[in-house]
């Protein structure tokens, strides 16, 4: 299994990260994608990923911190993304629920980081809370074709729009305790477009709801998703292990995007984390 979205560098793990990772490994989690949400977490995530073979990183500025993104910060994200252990830009997007940054500033930061991801030929990890249609509009206007709608909270229409754009739909702990809507739409989402995650240390799934979440608990999300999906077609061939997080070499010109190549990340994640356990 792979936890496709975790936050391993937060304070919640400061005292026992080694034990957390050991439990994940013992529970069958083979790799973890630790996701940045501000500059400090992005830098720490890259540092951790470079030390740990089974951890990979994404770097980005969350909409809550959109006011901190300037050209210098964007340049620093690009530097961090030069690490071979960085496989995505995120998490980025729009949050109209808490509105901790002005909405226009959130959108500007979102678009700038989408541009960075396209330049670097990396997928994006999208945070969307109470901003569904505006998020889709920005994605369309920016011609996004490679990424994931993380911790999905939308309806079937949103899922279909994301899939049309070439995005993956990722489910987290809420599907185990508040997932009626998600369970209803699972049957309409192509199997190959589904990912699972913990979003730890937040949103712990049942039977650990209310406790600190951790990568080992991704199994409960997986089990709930699998219980609502049919067995994958036997003629479907999973991506080989050698393709795991294998980023393509960047071309001399950064004006050409090859989403098929970068989609290998999520193709692998789905096959090893979504159903083929």
Image (spheres, rainbow, N blue to C red):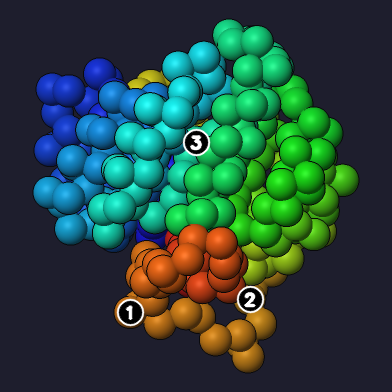
- Residue 93 on image: x %, y %: 61, 32
Q: Residue at x 39, y 28 (%)?
A: 73
Q: Residue furthest bottom?
A: 235
Q: Which mark is residue 91?
A: 3
Separation of marks 1 and 3 at Cα, in angstroms: 25 Å
Q: Residue at x 33, y 79 (%)?
A: 242
- Residue 189 on image: x %, y %: 75, 59
Say if residue 79 shows up in the picture: yes
Going from the N terminus, do you reach mark 1 or mark 3 first?
Answer: 3
Question: Tag 2: Cα neighbours inside 10 Å, few (<14), some, or many (≥20)?
Answer: few
Task: Tell us which disc is closer to us: 1 or 3.
Answer: 3
Task: Tell us which disc is closer to us: 1 or 2.
Answer: 1
Q: Assess whether mark 3 and mark 1 are in contact (beta carbons under 8 angstroms).
A: no
Q: On the rendered structure, is 139 left or right of 188? A: left
Give the SS element for disc 2: loop
Q: Nearer the viewer, residue 156 or 62?
A: 62
Q: Residue furthest front?
A: 253
Give the SS element for disc 3: strand
Q: Residue at x 61, y 32 (%)?
A: 110
Q: Quadrant of the C terminus?
A: bottom left
Going from the N terminus, do you reach mark 1 or mark 2 first?
Answer: 2
Q: Which residue is mark 2?
A: 232
- Residue 140 on image: x %, y %: 78, 48
Separation of marks 1 and 2 at Cα, in angstroms: 21 Å
Going from the N terminus, do you reach mark 3 or mark 2 first?
Answer: 3
Q: Which residue is mark 1?
A: 242
Q: Assess whether mark 2 and mark 1 are in contact (beta carbons under 8 angstroms).
A: no
């Amino acid at each position: 299994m792979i936890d496709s979205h975790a936050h391993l560098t937060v304070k919640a793990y400061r005292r026992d990260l080694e034990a957390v990772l050991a439990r994940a490994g013992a529970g069958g989690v083979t790799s973890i994608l630790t996701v940045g949400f501000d500059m400090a977490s992005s830098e720490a995530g890259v540092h951790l990923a470079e030390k740990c073979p089974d951890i990979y990183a994404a770097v980005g500025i969350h909409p809550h911190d959109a006011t901190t993104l300037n050209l210098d910060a964007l340049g620093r994200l690009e530097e961090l993304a030069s690490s071979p252990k960085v496989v995505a830009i995120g998490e980025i997007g729009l949050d109209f629920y808490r509105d901790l940054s002005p909405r226009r500033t959130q959108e500007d930061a979102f678009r700038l980081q989408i541009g960075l991801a396209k330049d670097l030929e990396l997928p994006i990890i999208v945070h969307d809370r109470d901003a569904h249609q505006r998020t889709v509009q920005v994605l369309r206007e920016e011609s996004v074709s490679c990424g994931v709608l993380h911790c999905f909270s939308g309806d079937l229409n949103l899922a279909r729009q994301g899939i049309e754009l070439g995005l993956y739909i990722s489910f987290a702990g809420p599907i185990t305790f508040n997932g009626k809507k998600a369970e209803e739409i699972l049957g309409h989402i192509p199997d190959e477009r589904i990912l699972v995650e913990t979003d730890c240390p937040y949103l712990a799934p049942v039977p650990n709801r209310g406790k600190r979440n951790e990568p080992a608990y991704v199994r409960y999300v997986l089990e709930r998703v699998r219980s609502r999906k049919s067995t994958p077609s036997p003629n479907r061939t999973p991506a080989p292990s050698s393709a795991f997080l294998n980023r393509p070499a960047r071309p001399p010109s950064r004006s050409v995007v090859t989403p098929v190549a970068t989609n290998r990340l999520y193709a692998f994640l789905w096959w090893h984390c979504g159903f083929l356990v």
